[in-house]
Image: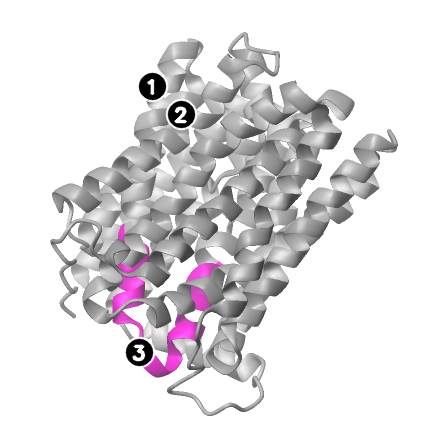
Amino acid sequence: MRSPVASPRAFASLVNPRFRWYFLFATAAIMADSVEHVISYWVMFQKFHSPALGGFAVISHWAPHLLFAAWSGALADRMDVRRLIQLGMGLLLSVSVGWGVIFATDTVAVWKAVVLLIVHGSAGVFWLPAAQVLIHELVDHEQLPSAVRLNATSRYIGFLLGPALGAGLLLAFGSTWGIWINALIYLPMLIWVVRIPYRGPRHAPPRAVRGLRDILIGMRTVAARPVLLSMTLLAGAASFFIGNAYQAQMPGFATLLGQARADFLYSLLLAADAAGGLAAGVMLETRGLLPPKPRTAFVLAMAWATLLGAFALSSWYWVSVVVLFVAGFVELAFNAMAQTLVQLNAPGDMRGRVIGVFTMAALGMRFFSGISTGVVGAIVGIRLSLAVSAAALLLVCIMLAAWLRRR
């Protein structure tokens, strides 16, 4: 199957006013998500100094995607996706309020953190697949490649601004008021999505979701198309071994690198990865570089694994910052490429189910990275666990690329 070529026009989707508003509010929501992580991870680390709890933060965030993302994709084929997005935003807002309550009353406990982390992870199951389906309602076919790239880039803008804003709120207002202020950032998306016109599912009749049967149909559709299958396997492998588990361990890495305080240098370490992703998004969108091809996506994923292995073994702060920046650049490139190929090759009548299966692989498999980097990191050290995970991903990518070439 030939992969469609992305539109060469820079920022083509931003010409569309509806997508501009979506891009702005989605970026704000992702930024608020990142702010919450900065504040809550820092408080948990100061309270418990537990890499295992940091690993559970990753596990609880992504386990709902592993279990329910394919089902959520089927919902997006049958239901009004605006309601799914609202539900996700409402859950995220309530979690930030909940963190503030236990910070204010000084009743932080492991079991409370566990509950809030699980609810937070469940929110993403509802809004992320639905938001990808909504993009097709907001832009036309020619603008779609640009919209998918910018949607991926919005995550990195949020990840870049989130640590800076989170550190600022933490220093200026403290953990309690900082995270309560953060809860307000979710409101624009929650309110705006009600007002946009929505034509509803155009290809599937409005009947009930058929549970496991819908999920299996989505999986068979992915398995029957080489582009969809290869990108889903690549996204799943990257998430299985590394995902974003190292970000939950960043307070530990910062301590190992001599930055044990919640100051500018700590937030810079958090922001370096996101800054690289943002730079990649802007460059790819303006220069028309790296047209989406499965082989290119595999090469970029191999480079990402190598860079994170180097970060894990680095003992120099500024070297680590540079390596994280380049790693973020490469990660955005291969993730946006994989998402673009899946969006453009998914059949219209099963788009939600295909996106659900891809989301299950790309996000749900991060459940296991929380074990390999967090839980195992508590035993052997976070540096060794991340280095071994990166080496394993590199080997698997080489094997998958060889299989794809034979196909």
Label 1 crowd bin: few (<14), some (14–19), many (20+), radius 10 Å: some
Q: Is there a contact, CB below 8 Å, between mark 3 and mark 2?
A: no
- Name the foreground residue: 83 vs 43: 83
Q: Which one is in front in this view, the residue at disc 1 or the one at disc 2?
A: 2
Mark sitting earlier along the chain (3/2): 2
Residue type pointed to by label 2: Ala
The verdict on residue 359 being magenta is yes
The residue pinned by badge 2 equals 272
Secondary structure at badge 2 equals helix
* Whether residue 128 is visible: yes
Mark sitting earlier along the chain (1/2): 2
Secondary structure at badge 3 equals loop
Q: What range is drawn magenta here?
A: 337-360
The residue pinned by badge 3 equals 347
Note whether 7 is above or below 2 in the view shown: above
Taking 362 as reference, is 323 left or right? left
Label 2 crowd bin: few (<14), some (14–19), many (20+), radius 10 Å: many
User: Residue 18: percent from the left, percent from the top?
Assistant: 36, 62
Q: CA distance from mark 1 to mark 2?
A: 7 Å
The figure's colour scheme reads one colour
The residue pinned by badge 1 equals 322
Residue type pointed to by label 1: Val
